[in-house]
Each structure stands twice: as C-alpha cells, then as structure tokens.
Image: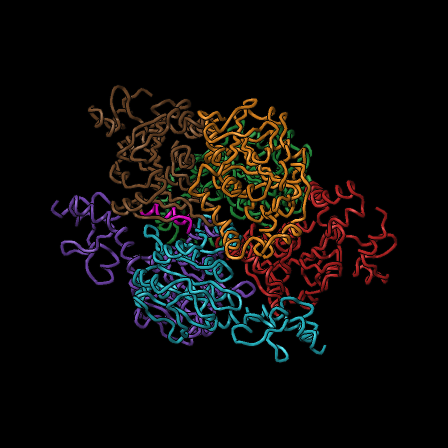
Chain colours: A orange, B brown, C cyan, D purple, E green, F red
Amino acid sequence: MSKVAGRMSVQAAANFLQQPNGGAGLLIGGVPGVPPAKVVIIGGGVVGQHAAEMAIGLGGNVTILDRNNTVLDECEARWGAAVTTVYSTSSALEDLVTDADVVIGAVLVKGDTAPKLVTAEMVKAMRPGSVLVDVAIDQGGAFETSHATTHQDPVYMVDEVVHYAVANMPGAVPRTSTYALNNATLPFTLALADRGAKEAMLGDAHLKNGLNVTGGKVTEPSVADALGYDFTDPDAAIADLAS
Amino acid sequence: MSKVAGRMSVQAAANFLQQPNGGAGLLIGGVPGVPPAKVVIIGGGVVGQHAAEMAIGLGGNVTILDRNNTVLDECEARWGAAVTTVYSTSSALEDLVTDADVVIGAVLVKGDTAPKLVTAEMVKAMRPGSVLVDVAIDQGGAFETSHATTHQDPVYMVDEVVHYAVANMPGAVPRTSTYALNNATLPFTLALADRGAKEAMLGDAHLKNGLNVTGGKVTEPSVADALGYDFTDPDAAIADLAS
Amino acid sequence: MSKVAGRMSVQAAANFLQQPNGGAGLLIGGVPGVPPAKVVIIGGGVVGQHAAEMAIGLGGNVTILDRNNTVLDECEARWGAAVTTVYSTSSALEDLVTDADVVIGAVLVKGDTAPKLVTAEMVKAMRPGSVLVDVAIDQGGAFETSHATTHQDPVYMVDEVVHYAVANMPGAVPRTSTYALNNATLPFTLALADRGAKEAMLGDAHLKNGLNVTGGKVTEPSVADALGYDFTDPDAAIADLAS
Amino acid sequence: MSKVAGRMSVQAAANFLQQPNGGAGLLIGGVPGVPPAKVVIIGGGVVGQHAAEMAIGLGGNVTILDRNNTVLDECEARWGAAVTTVYSTSSALEDLVTDADVVIGAVLVKGDTAPKLVTAEMVKAMRPGSVLVDVAIDQGGAFETSHATTHQDPVYMVDEVVHYAVANMPGAVPRTSTYALNNATLPFTLALADRGAKEAMLGDAHLKNGLNVTGGKVTEPSVADALGYDFTDPDAAIADLAS
Amino acid sequence: MSKVAGRMSVQAAANFLQQPNGGAGLLIGGVPGVPPAKVVIIGGGVVGQHAAEMAIGLGGNVTILDRNNTVLDECEARWGAAVTTVYSTSSALEDLVTDADVVIGAVLVKGDTAPKLVTAEMVKAMRPGSVLVDVAIDQGGAFETSHATTHQDPVYMVDEVVHYAVANMPGAVPRTSTYALNNATLPFTLALADRGAKEAMLGDAHLKNGLNVTGGKVTEPSVADALGYDFTDPDAAIADLAS
Amino acid sequence: MSKVAGRMSVQAAANFLQQPNGGAGLLIGGVPGVPPAKVVIIGGGVVGQHAAEMAIGLGGNVTILDRNNTVLDECEARWGAAVTTVYSTSSALEDLVTDADVVIGAVLVKGDTAPKLVTAEMVKAMRPGSVLVDVAIDQGGAFETSHATTHQDPVYMVDEVVHYAVANMPGAVPRTSTYALNNATLPFTLALADRGAKEAMLGDAHLKNGLNVTGGKVTEPSVADALGYDFTDPDAAIADLAS
C-alpha cells in the first residue's frame, strides 16, 4: 500500500496546486522556459521513492531528504542529476520546506507515531497556495498541522497552505490497490492455508514479524508499549500454539 | 498554452480516474505487479507530446496515434520502448479507444473545428469509469460526446465514461501559464513596439500569419469562411497599412 | 551461463519470428507507426532480467511475470514505463501467454525440474507463428509441449507455434560463454588450488553449496531425492574429508 | 522499408555471429565481465539510426561512421556515451572495419548505386567469423565482396567472413513491413485517388519527387543517366498531363 | 570549435571550483546527501547545449537561459527533469546569476560582439569562490568584467569571483580540436579543390555565407559595419569572380 | 570520502589531459565525429562507480575492471551499453591499461596496502600524455610508479605519462567533503554522545568494526600486523571498557 500511497501523493499535489482547487496555480513540471515546482520529499523509503518517481516523471524539481546515507546513494544512482539528495538535518529541512511548492511527508517509524518533522511555524513561513501531502497521517502525521481527512473532503487550509491528509489514500484507486494488496499477502495466505499458523510463522520470519497478538498476548513491543500491555516474546507465544 | 494544456490533461485524467471522483479507481502507473492504465493519446503534436511526457512519467502504458509518420518517428526516437506509436486509421483508433482507460484528444486542425474522431458509439463501448480529456474542446472537441465545461464543474458522465472538457485548461495554473504566454508573445510585442505593426509583420512571417483582421478586412481564410466574410490576402492588407 | 542464455533467448525469438524461419513475420520492435511484438517473460530472475534487457533494447512490448514482489519492484525501478510487471497468477499467465507473440520461459526452481507453467492448451490458443523459447529446458522445460533440441535443428512446431528449446544455448556463442564461465568459476578454482577442497569449502559457503557428491555420499537434498539416494549433510561430509 | 531493414540488420548479425551459423561465436552485448561485440555502422541515416538503436539495445559496442556532421551530432545527442561517432574518412573506415565483429553497410546515395566503401582487402583483414550485413545490396551493395542473397539462403562466406546480403530484407517480416509500407504510402494514395495524379503532384513536392517516368518521358535525372535516356524536367512533364 | 569550447567550459569550471585553485571548494555534482553546485548556462545554442550535457553528466544542478522558445523546448525534451529551462529576461538572469556557483557565458550574436549580459554589479553580488567561464570572450565576452586570458594564466579574480576567459579554449585539446575542425571544413575544402571558389560558393549556401572579403570588397554586413567599409552584396561579388 | 575522491578523479583527469597541463591534448568525451578518450577504471566499488558516473557523464569511453562478478553485474545494469565491464585478469588489465588515455586506480583492500596492479613496464608502454589518477595513494597506491603528491603540486611525469596522486583529494572541495563526512559520521557521533562508547559499539557492528585501538590494545588485525603489535579481539577489548 505504501507504493500506491507514494505514487498517489504526487497526483494529489498536482491536482491541489491548481488555483480553482485552492493551490498556487502551478504546474508541477512547469513548461520549457517556466521553471517547475519545487517538490520536497521527506523520507526516501518506499513511499518516498515511489513519490519521487512520479514527481520526476512530471518534470518537478525534486529534493529527497533522509538520514540514511544508503538510501540517498540509491536515490542518486537511480535518478542522477534529476534529483537532489540531502542529508536530513533540522536546518536543511527547514530551509527546503519553507521554500517548497509541494512537501510530501513520507517518513515512517515502524510501529510508532511518525515524528512531527514539519512544525506549525515552518508551515506559516511557506508561500500561500503551497501544498502539503501527509502520507504518514495513518501514524499521526509528519506535519504538526496535520489531521486526517477523507476522500469526500480531502483538504483544508492552514495559514493559506493546502493540507491533503487522507487517511486511506489507496482507497481511491481500489482496482490498483486491491491487486497490490493481494500480491503482497498471497504468499502468506497460501502458507497459512497450507501449513497452519504455527508452522507458517516458524517457516517465514516476515510472517512471524507481523504477529501482533496471539493467545491473548501482545507480541509486538511498540504495540504493547503504546497500549500499556505486557510484551510477550513472539517465539515463546508461537511455541505455545497448537500445530 | 498547448504545452500547459497537454501536461495538465494527464494530471486531470489521473485525478478523475480515482473512484471518489467518478473514475474506475485506477492509478495511472499501477504499481510493480499490477499493470498500469492504458493511456491513448490521439495526436502527436505539441499537445500530444507534452501529454505523453507526463503519462510516461507517471508510468502509464502509453500509445500515440497520428497520421504523420515524421511525428511518429520523433515520438519513438524520444521515448523508445516506453511508448507505442500507431499510424491512425479509423480501425486502429476504434480498437485502441474502446480498450483504453484514458483517452486524450489532442488533435488540432489549424483554424478549423477539430475532427470528431471518437464517436458516441465508441464511447458507449468503453469500460465504465474510463476518462476522456478533450484538449481540443476550444475548437469544438475531438469527441462526439464532448461539450465545454469549467474549472468549477469540470466533468460530466456519458455512458458511465468521465468527460473532462474544460475550455480554458491553462487558466487553472496561472502562475505557470502567464509566464509561458509572456515568453511566447514577448518577441512579437517587442517587435510591434519597436517597429510598428506594418514593419513588424513584414519582418516576421510568424507574426504576419497571426493576422486575422486589419482595416476592416478578414485576412485569414478559414475565419473568413467560417464567418461568411470576404477573404483579403494579408500581404495586400498589410501593404495598405501606414508605416 | 544464465546471463548468456537469457540474452540469447531474445535473439533466437527475433530470428524465428521471421516468416521464412516459421514465424509470424514480425519485427520485435515494430517500427514507428506499427506496434511492436508482445514479449512475455515468465520469471524475473537472472535469465528473465537479461532477456528483458535485450527485448526492451529491441523495442518490444515487454511484460515480466513473477511471484516475488521484490523482483517485480527491481524490474520496474530499472525499466520504468518500458516494462509491465505482473504478479504471476495462473489466470494472469494464461491471459498474457495466449495473447503473446513471444514467450520466454525463464523459471528455475533450484535443483528441481522446472514447473510446467504453460500448458498444451494454452499453446493451442496462441496465434500461429508465435514463438516460445524455453530457457528452462535443461531442467525439463517450462512448457508442457517442450522437448530439448539442438543448435543443428533448434526448432519444431506444435499447433503452428514455433518451439525453440536448445538444451545448451550458450554453446552457440563460445567466445562469450567460455569467458563468462571462467569469470564465474575462477575464484573457486583458485581457492581449490590454493587451499585444497576441504578448506576451500569451509571458507566459502557458495562453494560448499555447490557440493553435490563427495566420498560416495550425496550432499544435495533435491539430487538425493530425485535419484533415490540417501542425503548426507554436507557439513558432515566435508568434516570427513582430509585437509 | 529502410526502418525495417535497419532494425533487421542487427538481428541478422546477432544470429549469424553464433558459431553453428558460421560466425565467431559471440553474443552482441557480451555479458557483465565479458566485453561486447564491436559493431560498426557505415552511414547514420534512417537505416543506420534504426540499426544503431537495436545494436545499442542489445548492448553492443557501437560506432557510427558518417560524413555529415549534423547526422553525427544527432546520433550523439540521442545516445550519448553509448555510441561512438566518427567522421568517415577512408583511414578511419579501414581501421574500424578491420577491427569489427559486425559491420552494417547502411549507405545510400539517392538514385545511384551505393559506393563500395569496404574493399575486398579490408574484408580479408577482418577476423574469421565476423559478420557483414549489406543493407545497401538493393543498390549494388556497400561491400566489394557483396552479392545479393535470399531469405532461403541468406549468407555466404568470403575469406571466412560471413556475408548477409538479402536483397529484400523486409520481406521476412511481412506483418510489420506491410503496415509500415501502407503507413508511408497511404497519404499519397489518398491524394491520387481524391485529386488525380496531376493535381496531387502539384500539391505535394514529395509525391512529385517520386515521379520517375510519365508520358513516356524519364523525369528523374539519375535514372535517365543510368539507363541512357533523355531527362525531362518533371514540372514540364506534369504540366503536360491532363487534369 | 563551439562544441569543444562548450564541453571544455564545464571541466574548466570544475577545476577552478577547487579551493587550491581559487574556487569555493565545491564538487559540481556534490555527492549523495550533499547538494550539487548550481550551474547557470546563458545561451542554449551549440555551446550551451554541449556545456549542459557535460554539467548534467557531472551531476550539477543545471539551468539554461535563452530567449528562443524552440531552443528551450529542445533542451527540455532532451534532458527532462535533469535540467531547468528559463526564458531569459533581465530579472530572471540576475536572480539566477547571483545565486550561481558556476556561470557559463554561451551567448553568440553572429558577426557581432557578444552582449554584456552579466554586469559588474551582478558579479559583485555573487558568492566568493564562484566561477565564471566566458566562452564568448573571442567576441568581447558575455561578462562586463571579462578580459581575455591564456592557457598559461587562465584565470583572474574580480570581487572574489574566479574568471576563466581563455580566448582559444580548444587550443588546449588539439588532438580533439584538430579533428573536429577537419571534419567541419573538409567538405568545403573538397568543394573548393574540385570546383574552384566561384562554383563551390554558388553550389553551397553555407560556403557562400562564410565569405567575408573577396576582390577587395567586404561581403559580410556586420564586418563592413564594424570596420567602416562599404558592404558589397556577396552574390554580386561572386558573380564578378572568374570561374 | 571515497565518493568525493571517485568523482574528483575524473575531473582531475580531464584537466590534466589538456596539453598545457602536460597531457595529450584530448577532451574526455571527444565531440561528435571525434572519438572520446579511453578511460579505464580499475575497481568497481564505491570509488570506481562514482568515477564511472562522472566519466560516462562527460562522454568518455569507459571500461571498468573488477574481479567481483556481482559488482560487474551492478555496473552493467546501471549503465548498459555506455560502459564496458571486464573481469580483471592480469592480461586483460595490461591490454586495457596500455591502450588507455586515462587510468583511474580505484582498488582498495580493507586495512591493507593497495595491490600494485599497474607495473612500471605497463606505464612505459602507454601513449605519451596519458593520465593516471591514483585514488588508492593513501594506501600506497595502485601504480608501481606512484608516490603521493599535494594539491599545490599535484602531478609529475614518469615516461611521459602524467601521474596525479594527491594524497588527500577531497581536501580540495571542503564545502562538499565536510558535509559528506558529517553525514557519514553523524549517526556514530550521536550514538557515542547518547550512549557512551561501550554501549554504542555493542549496538552497532559498523561502529565496532571501526575500532582500531582501545585501552592500549590494537583491535584491528591488519593494523596489528602492519605495525608489529599483538592483536586483541575487539569484542574482548570492548567488554573490558567501563559502561
């Protein structure tokens, strides 16, 4: 789903940059002779790379921020001079965000709420009509000014900056998303059906890592922590399951 | 403006392919493992090439139809295996349109109404939720089912197919369009200011070709024809002007 | 050798698509205005990716099927809009194969016979003059209708579909293959020469993984299974070797 | 047809470079770690550029020779570091041809026999198993050692060098060639049908330029010269036609 | 020679951006995580496009300014999101130059001195250690602060900005330049040798356009104007030549 | 720093290939019609890949040598026909080096002196004015004829071949290098500051691997070996540290 959301984030930004939709009235790629919009993508993981692919495809001036040098290397090897990669420090982030036409929040911290990297003050310093897309809204959002919206009413304004923060972005393209979800989950479904839960999890670390609750025990530390339950080691919990 | 409209046509299509906006619920580029939308662009001129650049950039499965082999050569040299080029015959057009998720009407016939290449019958044969974008609507439209819309109410449905036919597409991105228009017209404005209309037109065939009416005479044949006036040769009309 | 075979598979397909060679009389890349051939590659591993690189290079309309999402991500990151990636389900495979001009069978299951993904019925449903290339023929073949052929007599017809299934494809380009094989095996040869078999295998898991038989014991489970011998753990067998 | 022949020339070369087919046993693109074949294309026009697109697509080491600097600029702008462009002098040509694995003769002189740029002596100096493809064979051939062959028996050896010189290359891919020919000729056919020969030629310089004989007069100077007839100016001959 | 100079301009800039050579201590392409240098190229003709190819190749953040929309279209079609194209107005130029790390002056006005587009005031506003390369120095230079230098002493500082303005840049790479010059002039040389000056010029408009002086008469208007001589129409002067 | 040095190596080579700087007078990329310089990069790791990106960007004819097939696969997947990859044997290396215009020594052996892959004899066989850049000079150099130089006096000649072997290449571009170094080291610095040396090293294998000396003990085997000290296992040494 991250891939779908990352790709959609850019077409949402393109749409809400149009003036009748509340934006500054800019085309992401400009046209020859008229510079493109500045698109800043915070986070170069799956969401960020799929967003970058689309934003570069539309001809945007794209900058990716990340704190993982390997991720930045990958991005530069993939897009060369068509992307600018920046190691994410708070000052680099502030400079880039406040000069951006579009900011895509694409940071995820596994099992935890997303860090509020963009403050209300930065939003206030942005140009009117700029567009924020918060792909991390499911986990609390990457912008201090974000709150979840719906496809029926996807945007709101804060300090004349458009906020798009639909909680279930892939829901708008079900004919793509449903297949993507099936493709991602089918191997696990088959393993569960063929071998039962215990054997399937013992045979596949990825499936085991997805276990949050079993037999009344919480087996994912950040979930346990967030909800105030005791944490049980998943290996122990699985060992207790009937085969 | 053709460049702006061509580029915008694809982001309009992407937006209205979303299910909450009336479309089939597809992402133009799909995601890895899920095939992209089929985007058919009728006409490989300025509008069509700018549309193609965006649609390929979003990862779409793009086919360009044209009757000019040089245009098809250019498109294939530019995008290689990422585009399919097809010589436009009525049967090729019908096959491609009725199997498309998105159709961009990008045909222009200078000074004339656009040909109605896509019939109502073809539209009826398309899948529900497919999207038509009629960039030629200013000249009457390329689809038999088209009528002009506005940015306030940009789409309507015919046979469950979304029609986007905003008459002044570039008006939605004025910060891009105004500059693009200035860049295109500035040389002519400077020539008119520096040298007067007569000398300016004598010195620049492009400017002279833009002359439609002067001294009460219609100097553009298709305008004269459409409005029922006599046609006056522009060279003669210009010769009559005071320097 | 997989790289050589993957690359050769596409030039074999191009050659046998020619009408005097039994094929449908198509150029893989078409020409501008005439659509390219539809090339379906089953399997996106080493063979499949090298085949894809060649088929895209010749301008084909290329689709890669695989059940591994990471492989599909890699392929799409590498070739973007020039490739379509599809998660391989039996219905997707059937739809694509029966509409293909070229099918490359590039599936390998380590140490086992290749699965017969393309049935005789699917072959019957293909257009006459289409071309199948079975790179998996060494392991029994990916098509139900495959049987091994030679460079002297490389193809045969089943239901008017050309089958190319040369068992030792790289043998036709020895000046490339010999070097490729040397490059792949030289580090192992040097290790064996410098350190002896036991130490060399203890120091290099890849070399150890290549051990099938030693001291009269079969140390590779699928070989043991296929031939009806007892399986001996390779670590135990190696420990018994003299240094 | 030049586009079809240019593209086919490379797949013919790839096929005949295989050892069982008489060639040196090389894969055009090599594989990682094993260098590619050296492909020299004489002439960077339509044939040469389509050949280059395919040869680069297969990963070959491609050099294009031409005497037209604009053509060389175009080639380098299109393929960058993936191609080497060389101004064609007799010494550059000799150096490149005698060190090539594949030579594509893609020179055309309008209405005249092709110049014999590659001499028998150069052929003798080439490595055994190298492959020559003479796309200019219809006009006498670009190699001194060429004579026309057929799809039934496409190659012969001279000094251990494979010569492929099929006179009607596009005939092997009729499902591509027929459409290509239709696309190229349809506008002329329609003009002739709609307006008659005289008006059609007066209205289209390209059509007029194609006129070789009319009313018993030869209207193409090189044809007249080659066959020993008087030359008649085409404008005069057309003026004599009935409307 | 413009091609050589355009390409060299970027490697000169890269070299003098190094701190020991007087520059700001920047790598043109940065590295992943560290943004690239901003390279502004004034003029998108032959010099500018060859400079852009190199600067994009080194990973720079490249902007091309021109007043010709067709040139800007070409540049954007060629490099896509890897380049920013800007219609050159005096305010756009000032904004870009004063924020640049490298400025390449690549403007040529045929037969005339280059316009001084970059003023001394703009230079003063640049960051210390930025580098100007004046490829137009042969025609007086594009920067108000330029004066010609030599390969022995190629740079000087004005307001802490490095100026590289070697009058004969291609002279540093004679093994490339000599061949380039031969390739460009050989057709004219052969025509002069084969047919004599009069016939050669009558048969080739490009050669005729190169005629500046013949029979004591100045046949190029801007030369005549610059030197205070009468201008003679070249056709008339050529007609007077003996065959 | 390897990235900075790899990228700089090519701009150093470009600069010293100029005749006034001692080189052969060649432009790395040539120009259309004049072949590019032959750039041979020994080692396809981080240094080599960054060097290759720049050399291909400048239009050079680039060959990468390595003994790691995975590295060669990566390089070919990334640059396709724009690069030649060669498995490094002593004969391949000698052939390529002695025919090169530029050789980049980009081999590193962790913690050890670089192997002297290029002998004095090979250097003697190179063309006058060729350029060697020894990025491995910090570890003793990859060329038998190398000795460390400085940015003040960066090159010297051996057998008419230019040697560039500045020991601290990144020092010339401090505004790029300092940021690159910060980005690479910041995570470690933060870990050390937040958690103390012991916990930080226990929590991060990369940090632990960087430990050379602690508590008077040498914990890196090649350092111990080179300096004649006893080697202490880093885990043991860390366990002895106070938390």
User: Which residue is most to the left?
Assistant: D242
**Near-viewer residue (E164 or A65):** A65
Q: What percent of the width, then of the height, locates residue B115?
A: 26, 36
From what the image shows, is residue B102 above or below residue F37? above
Main SS of residues in magenta: helix
**Near-viewer residue (C78 or B48):** C78
State the quadrant of the C terminus of chain D. Answer: top left
Residue A168 seen in this snapshot = yes
State the quadrant of the N terminus of chain D. Answer: bottom left
Q: How many marks?
A: 0
Which residue corresponds to the image point at 74% horizontal and 53% vertical from the top-left?
A: F167
Residue D107 seen in this snapshot = no
Compared across the picture, whether B34 is left or right of E99 comes to: left
Q: What percent of the width, then of the height, locates residue A8?
A: 48, 38
Q: What percent of the width, then of the height, locates residue C149?
A: 40, 74
Res F236 quadrant in image: bottom right
**Near-viewer residue (C14 or C115):** C115
**Near-viewer residue (B21 or E170):** B21
Res B10 quadrant in image: top left
Compared across the picture, whether A236 is left or right of F147 comes to: left
Res A147 quadrant in image: top right
User: Which residue is most to the right?
Assistant: F216
Is residue B74 within the magenta segment? Answer: yes
Q: What percent of the width, then of the height, locates residue B72?
A: 35, 47
User: Which residue is most to the front?
Assistant: A242
User: Which residue is most to the bottom?
Assistant: C216
Is residue F85 within the magenta segment? Answer: no
Magenta extent: B69-83
Compared across the picture, whether B90 is left or right of F106 comes to: left
